[in-house]
Amino acid sequence: MNCLGACALGPVVVVDGKYHSKVRKSEVKRILEGALAGDEGIDVTADRRVFPVEVSCPRCNHSLMDPAHLVDGHPSIRVTVSFGRMHGWLCLSALYGSYNVASEYPIPEKTVVHFFCPHCHQELSGAQACPECGAPMVRMIVRGGGVVQICSRKGCKSHMLDLNGVNVV
């Protein structure tokens, strides 16, 4: 398999695109049972793997944060998106680990979406493909140093965060 980029958080277990850090042998059974039971719920208010990030465009360095549109009770990450013949806005949760979004148009599952900076209008494409599904990754700069990348395919939960050499997945 590809590198998970999470050496600092190892041992890491990935189940259905969810990353579990510093896993002990005794926790593996519980993690697998939760996945088999369809445990998809993430409590963004209590889960220690969920935390806020502030991001900007890697091309023009303008902030992508939108305090006027809250997602998960925090300012959202607002971008312009296109898919098929649709073109509009998308607000992503700024909580790393949350997959909640608000969008101008419903996006069908498994659709690859193109993300653009609302300021410079450049595409926010990353240099690599998603390790889970092969779709392009979307790259944003984290305030204070680092990079976050998310998969551009609706429904894929692959994401990577690199904070000054400390990888969080």
Image (tube, rainbow, N blue to C red):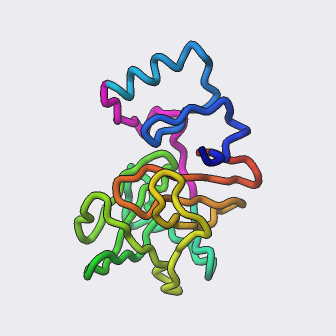
State whether residue 25 is above or below residue 55: above
Q: Main secondary structure of the magenta part?
A: loop
State whether residue 164 is above or below residue 85: above
State whether residue 116 is above or below residue 52: below
Q: Residue at 35% across / 35% down in the picture?
A: 41
Residue 39 quadrant: top left
Residue in front for this viewpoint, 42 or 3: 3
Residue in front for this viewpoint, 113 or 71: 113
In the current view of this chain or complex, which residue is farthest to the front? 1
Residue 71: x %, y % from top left: 37, 55
Q: Residue at 61% across / 33% down in the picture?
A: 12
Residue 52: x %, y % from top left: 54, 50
Residue in front for this viewpoint, 125 or 164: 125
Q: Which residues are magenta?
A: 37-53
Q: Residue at 38% across / 58% down in the picture?
A: 70
Seen in the image, is 47 located left or right of residue 21? left
Residue 81: x %, y % from top left: 38, 75
Q: The C terminus is located in which quarter? A: top right
Seen in the image, is 118 located left or right of residue 25? left
Q: The N terminus is located in which quarter? A: top right
Q: Is residue 39 magenta?
A: yes
In the current view of this chain or complex, which residue is farthest to the bottom? 120
Q: Residue at 57% across / 13% down in the picture?
A: 26
In the current view of this chain or complex, which residue is farthest to the top? 26
Residue 21 quadrant: top right
Q: Is residue 128 magenta?
A: no
